[in-house]
Image: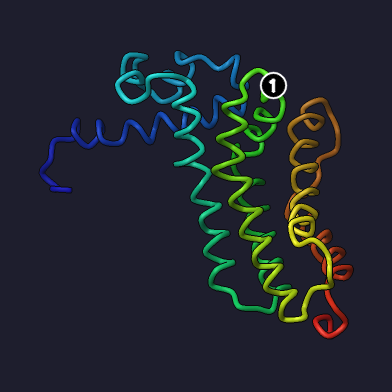
Amino acid sequence: MDAGEPKFRRRKADRPGEIVEAALQVFAEKGFAAAKLDDIARRAGVSKGAVYLYFETKEDIFRAVVTQAVSPNIAAVKAMAAAHPGPIPDLIRGVAQMVAGVVAGTPIGGVAKMVIAEAGNFPEIARVWHDELVAQALGAMTLAIEAAQARGEVKPGDARTYAIQLVAPLLMTVLWRETFVPVGARPFDIPAVMTQHVETLLNGMLTQGARA
């Protein structure tokens, strides 16, 4: 961008990203049904009319949140899996810690809870979340585990089931944080939970040769 370009033009170019970031926070705090475009506009520091310049509906904003604010993390998981020929324990540890760090440090967990809670009334948000995120991450890890089985590192078993076993405690811990911690429950350290879980899972799924 030309350094001499007027500031207001640079600001206008930044607006869609600012709206998406604001929407991520508002969805995490309020849920989908309760989130208002006025709330998102106010958080982004723009007018409601400015939001409509870039997004026609709240569903469009949610889709942008998924594709712009969350999907890059899934793309990173897929890239790690594609670039890692083995051994599988190193990949699983790396992916688990990366995802746990993202979930621990961003509002993504609140949005995940929102999707689960409101999928019945808003099936489209569940569809987007599944197609753009869940299916992509699960598919990448399933392929990696299948490859590890072919190398003799992982015991026989359904690779997709192994993949869901990997992420299930992360989801449970996120739901604990979003549901019970606000009413006084003792929180869990999400990266620490995943570290302990991964070692337990690896102990069960690896062949004797891969554990050596």
**Residue 14 coordinates in the image, percent (x, y):** 30, 36
Side (left or right) of 146 relative to 126: right
**Residue 128 coordinates in the image, percent (x, y):** 55, 35
Is 22 rendered above or below residue 100? above
Query: Which residue position is annotated with label 1?
Result: 120
Label 1 crowding class (10 Å Cα cut-off): few <14, some 14-19, many 20+? few
Side (left or right) of 109 relative to 43: right
Kindly indicate the quadrant of the structure image that contains residue 172: top right
Residue at x-position 79% and y-position 55%: 161
Task: List the single residue furthest toward the left.
Answer: 4
Q: Quadrant of the C terminus?
A: bottom right
Is 123 rendered above or below residue 7? above
Residue at x-position 59% and y-position 67%: 81
Colour mapping: rainbow
Of residue 155 and residue 190, the one placed in the foreground of this image is 155
**Residue 134 coordinates in the image, percent (x, y):** 63, 45
Residue at x-position 83% and y-position 81%: 211
Side (left or right) of 165 relative to 80: right
Q: Amino acid at mark 1?
A: Gly
Is 200 rendered above or below residue 14? below
Side (left or right) of 190 relative to 155: left
Is 204 rendered above or below residue 58? below
- Secondary structure category for the residue under label 1: loop
Residue at x-position 59% and y-position 74%: 84
**Residue 124 coordinates in the image, percent (x, y):** 57, 26
Q: How many marks?
A: 1
